[in-house]
Image (cartoon, helix red, strand yellow):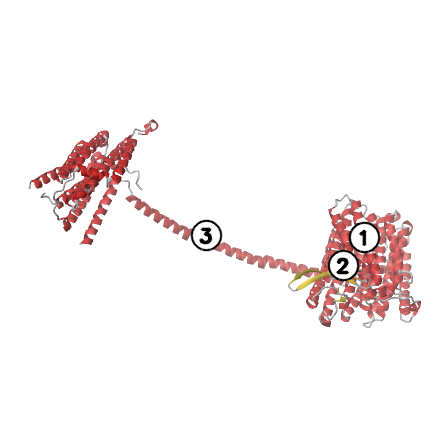
């Protein structure tokens, strides 16, 4: 434990060095840059595993150091190794490793392959740094760095205007949340005097340290703003679906598995600060987001957008879990979701790759025969996400959340919203699978689709296995995960599965999931046999509602009409202010200066110059007049001398007399 | 020894006045020089007269002054006349009122 | 009485020579008249018991300077023939009033000084031997300086009086 904490900083440093080296490599050194990135992330993964192993036996270890001093205060930074960070580090490193390998195949034909791996390594470094950070300040730095990496990778194909716009949007929208985060952080520092999470084995972020319940709640909510932005919660979720403009491995890694989960991880990190009031807000925001995003996903036709809204929805679940059930519940769903959502995205990437960059599910169909491995793994992912009972991780983690919501004292509404979300999730995932893999091919591209190379399918298989297995670590019968995070020990007890608390919820959710799958399968199983041109069955049934949902409830349009327009109007106003008022002021000053200059010139001309002219004229005249005395005639001089002599003599004589 | 000091002095003053008037009135450079010599001689006469009528004639002070004065006058006359000749060679004239190159 | 008459004669000779030197039109006559005035002064010096100075005056002024003036007059002979020379003579008004004024002042000052009414010292004689001794003792420095001065004046007069080099001949 003591030894591993000394080397914990190597976990983010290895990929950081790889990113730095990759940035310096010429474009044609593809193998070297990919090898560097994958090797570095492998080192990080092994170190994370070692760290994880260390945390199994002992609790928490920190390593702090003083960054700099100003006045009497000193800013401390450091890293922490505890179950929360260790599980997150392992998850991030593992998913990153698999996705890096997958990218070898997916990006094989891209000419900016070297740059891609450089950015990926940078992202991994920032994310791992965020995970082990023991200071809110260091956390924020890494937080912004992952934001930067996300921006760079969404805009990786910046030649596409939509990708550039999406990158900009992602950056700006998350920045709005980060502003709240920053303010909260400053407030916290003002109150508590430290940004450390743990110092000398003690937590530093107690509500008491933050100056009472009200201040603590306010700070917690401000920090939650950052999480809302990063994790795509309502109302800042708009950037995440647009972020799908990036390459699919990026979507899988950053916008499904890791970075967007950082918001959830942030809340888990500062959990001691979260007062009941703050947690209520978290729960409600999560519940609304879960249902809202799931309902939008029902009507989308882009395979990646569906998954993106699904991600938003699942992040809402995580927030609900954190709010209602605690760190373990939320983190468990985060972990399972990371694996199966990465799996789904990579599967989608494989489909897109196989269908020659086609992303519209209405133009696919019948791919189960042409992409068998992808189909099998995708089905695993879909069932995990939908929450098919017993064998899939999603079931256990979602069930834990629903169970926590059921017992939540605040309100029962989030519980029902969660159930509705579960139903919707099952529905849209079944719809997607039916559209993509079942039925008959809708287009020529789909007919000639091909399976991806092993470099892409092997990570899929590994992720599929994990998507199944991870769930078993957190079942109610053997709550190892929860015990691990909370520092207790878990015993195996099948009877817990059957008690009266768990069973009704489990049965209810199972029934809803089954209903969703069957209904969706019934509708789309038939629909997928028909031509692609035909409208969606739901659209036929409820055209107005469907259109509304398809347009994402007009949130983007709403923002365009309000925030963006307001901002534009304000910018125009500022422009006007700048042009007319400030510009006028400047012009007035300029005019004044000009007038003064003219006055000065006139004074110079008429007074100074004239004065000098007159003066010099007078001097010259005097000189001329005097020079007439000096006429060169010696006799004149002699005469003057004589007269002067007389004058002198007369003066002397008179003086004597 | 009847003539008094005043008589000599008046003679000297007359000589000086004549020399000055001539030096001022005449245009020819040679005549101006002659006027100057006359004034110089008037001064010399004063020296001699004061020596003769002074309280310590045995010290020969006035005589010495006159001797040196005469020597200087000789040098002055030589130089002045050389200048007159040189200027005449340049300007083809000896009229002093033509020599006004130094006028302001 | 005899001395008085001798003084008056000498003074008359001197003044007449001076006036003539300043007034005559002919420059050679002027030079000769000036020589006469110098000779009159030399006589007055003799009368005042300054034999050595009187003879020096006779030698230098009458013998040297007057001859020099005559030579100069002869060398610049063309000057009086210049146009405008006639008008130049009629400018007495420029010089005589000033000369008269200075004269009046001097005579007034002489008349106004009571200390000038004195008798001459008796038995005054200035032998040449004594003058020579004084020159070699008390006045040796001025004597040397005068020698230097005269040498410089001689050289200067020669240089100035030299004919111009041939290059600037056309200018003259």
Q: What kind of element bears circle 2?
A: helix
Mark 3 and mark 1 lie on one chain; the one further toward the N terminus is 1
Does residue C149 appear left or right of residue A383 in this picture?
A: left
Q: Residues within 10 Å of mark 3 (few under 14, many from 20)?
A: few
Q: What kind of element bears circle 1?
A: helix
Q: Residues within 10 Å of mark 1 (few under 14, many from 20)?
A: some
Residue A43's disc is 1
Residue A608 in sight in this render: yes
Residue C59 placement (x, y as % from top left): 18, 33
Which of the image's four quarters has the C terminus of chain A? bottom left
Which of the image's four quarters has the N terminus of chain A? bottom right
Picture quadrant of residue B38: top left
Q: Alpha-carbon distance for marks 3 and 1?
A: 76 Å
Residue C144 placement (x, y as % from top left): 27, 37
Q: What kind of element bears circle 3?
A: helix
Does residue A154 appear left or right of residue A618 in this picture?
A: right
Mark 3 and mark 2 lie on one chain; the one further toward the N terminus is 2
In the depicted view, which residue is nearer to us: B82 or B56?
B56
Discs 3 and 1 lie in a common subunit: yes
Residue A130's disc is 2
Mark 2 and mark 1 lie on one chain; the one further toward the N terminus is 1
Residue B75 placement (x, y as % from top left): 25, 35
Label 3 belongs to which residue? A601
For mark 3, name the chain: A
In the depicted view, which residue is nearer to us: A4 or A107?
A4
């Amino acid at each position: 434990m003591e030894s591993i904490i000394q080397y914990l900083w190597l976990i983010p440093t290895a990929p950081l060095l790889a990113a730095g080296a990759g940035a310096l490599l010429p474009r044609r050194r593809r193998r070297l840059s990919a090898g560097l990135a994958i090797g570095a992330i492998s080192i990080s993964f092994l170190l994370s595993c070692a760290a994880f192993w260390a945390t199994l036996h002992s609790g928490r270890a920190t390593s702090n150091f003083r960054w700099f001093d100003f006045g009497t205060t000193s800013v401390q930074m450091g890293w922490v190794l505890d179950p929360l960070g260790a599980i997150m580090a392992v998850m991030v490193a593992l998913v990153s490793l698999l996705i890096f390998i997958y990218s070898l195949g997916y990006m094989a034909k891209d000419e900016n392959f070297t740059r891609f791996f450089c950015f990926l390594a940078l992202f991994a470094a920032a994310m791992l740094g965020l995970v082990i950070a023991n200071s809110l300040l260091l956390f924020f730095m890494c937080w912004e760095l992952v934001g930067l990496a996300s921006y760079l990778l969404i805009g990786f194909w910046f030649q596409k205007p939509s990708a550039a716009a999406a990158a900009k949007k992602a950056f700006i929208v998350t920045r709005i949340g980060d502003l709240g985060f920053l303010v909260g952080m400053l407030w916290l520092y003002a109150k508590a005097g430290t940004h450390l999470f743990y110092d000398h084995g003690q937590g530093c972020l107690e509500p008491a340290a933050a100056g009472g319940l009200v201040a603590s709640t306010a700070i917690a909510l401000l920090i939650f703003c950052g999480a809302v932005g990063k994790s795509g919660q309502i109302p800042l979720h708009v950037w995440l679906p647009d972020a799908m403009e990036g390459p699919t491995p990026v979507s899988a890694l950053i916008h499904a598995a890791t970075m967007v989960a950082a918001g959830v991880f942030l809340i888990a990190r500062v959990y001691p600060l979260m007062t009941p009031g703050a947690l209520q807000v978290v729960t409600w925001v999560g519940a609304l987001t879960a249902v809202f995003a799931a309902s939008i996903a029902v009507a989308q036709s882009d395979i990646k957008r569906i998954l993106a809204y699904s991600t938003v929805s699942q992040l809402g679940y995580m927030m609900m879990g954190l709010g209602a059930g605690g760190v373990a519940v939320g983190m468990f769903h985060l972990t399972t979701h990371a694996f199966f959502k990465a799996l789904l995205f990579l599967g989608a990437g494989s489909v897109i790759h196989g269908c020659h960059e086609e992303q519209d599910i209405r133009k696919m169909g019948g791919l189960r025969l042409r992409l068998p491995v992808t189909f099998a793994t995708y089905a695993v992912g879909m069932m995990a996400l939908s929450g098919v009972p017993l064998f899939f991780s999603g079931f256990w983690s979602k069930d834990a959340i629903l169970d926590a919501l059921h017992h939540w004292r605040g309100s029962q509404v989030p519980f029902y919203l969660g159930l509705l979300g579960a139903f919707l999730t099952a529905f849209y995932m079944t719809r997607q699978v039916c559209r993509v893999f079942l039925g008959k091919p809708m287009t020529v591209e789909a007919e000639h689709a091909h399976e991806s190379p092993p470099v892409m399918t092997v990570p899929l298989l590994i992720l599929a296995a994990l998507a199944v297995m991870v769930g078993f670590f957190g079942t109610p019968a053997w709550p190892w995960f929860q015990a691990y995070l909370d520092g207790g020990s878990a015993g195996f007890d099948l009877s817990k599965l059957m008690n009266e608390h768990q069973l009704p919820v489990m049965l209810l959710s199972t029934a809803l999931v089954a209903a969703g799958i069957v209904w969706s399968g019934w509708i789309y199983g038939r629909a997928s046999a028909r031509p692609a041109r035909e409208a969606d069955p739901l659209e036929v049934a409820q055209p107005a509602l469907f259109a509304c949902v398809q347009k994402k409830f007009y949130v983007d349009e709403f923002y365009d009409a309000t925030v963006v327009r307001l901002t534009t109007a304000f910018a125009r106003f500022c422009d006007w202010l700048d042009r007319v008022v400030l510009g006028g002021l400047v012009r007035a000053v300029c005019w004044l200066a000009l007038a003064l200059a003219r006055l000065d010139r006139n004074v110079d001309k008429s007074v100074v110059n004239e004065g000098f002219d007159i003066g010099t004229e007078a001097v010259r005249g005097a000189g001329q007049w005097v020079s007439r005395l000096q006429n060169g005639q010696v006799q004149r001089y002699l005469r003057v001398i004589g007269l002067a002599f007389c004058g002198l003599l007369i003066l002397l004589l008179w003086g004597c007399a | 020894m009847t003539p008094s000091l005043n008589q000599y002095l008046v003679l000297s003053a007359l000589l000086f006045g004549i020399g000055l008037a001539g030096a001022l009135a005449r245009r020819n450079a040679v005549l101006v020089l002659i006027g100057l010599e006359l004034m110089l001689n008037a001064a010399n006469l004063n020296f001699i007269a004061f020596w003769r009528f002074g309280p310590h004639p045995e010290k020969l002070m006035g005589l010495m002054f006159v001797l040196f004065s005469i020597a200087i006058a000789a040098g002055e006359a030589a130089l002045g006349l050389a200048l007159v000749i040189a200027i005449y060679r340049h300007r083809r004239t000896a009229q002093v009122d033509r020599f006004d190159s130094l006028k302001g | 009485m005899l001395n008085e008459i001798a003084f008056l004669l000498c003074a008359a000779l001197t003044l007449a020579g001076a006036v003539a030197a300043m007034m005559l039109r002919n420059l050679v006559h002027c030079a000769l008249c000036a020589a006469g005035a110098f000779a009159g002064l030399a006589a007055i010096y003799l009368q005042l018991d300054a034999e050595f100075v009187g003879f020096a005056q006779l030698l230098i002024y009458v013998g040297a300077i007057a001859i020099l003036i005559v030579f100069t007059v002869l060398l610049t002979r063309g000057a009086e023939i210049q146009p405008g020379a006639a008008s130049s003579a009629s400018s007495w008004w420029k010089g005589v009033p000033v000369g008269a004024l200075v004269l009046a002042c001097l005579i007034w000052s002489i008349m106004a000084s009571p200390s000038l009414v004195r008798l001459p010292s008796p038995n005054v004689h200035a032998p040449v031997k004594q003058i020579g001794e004084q020159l070699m003792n008390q006045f040796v420095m001025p004597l040397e300086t005068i020698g230097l001065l005269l040498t410089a004046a001689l050289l200067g007069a020669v240089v100035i009086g030299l004919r111009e080099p041939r290059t600037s001949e056309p200018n003259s």
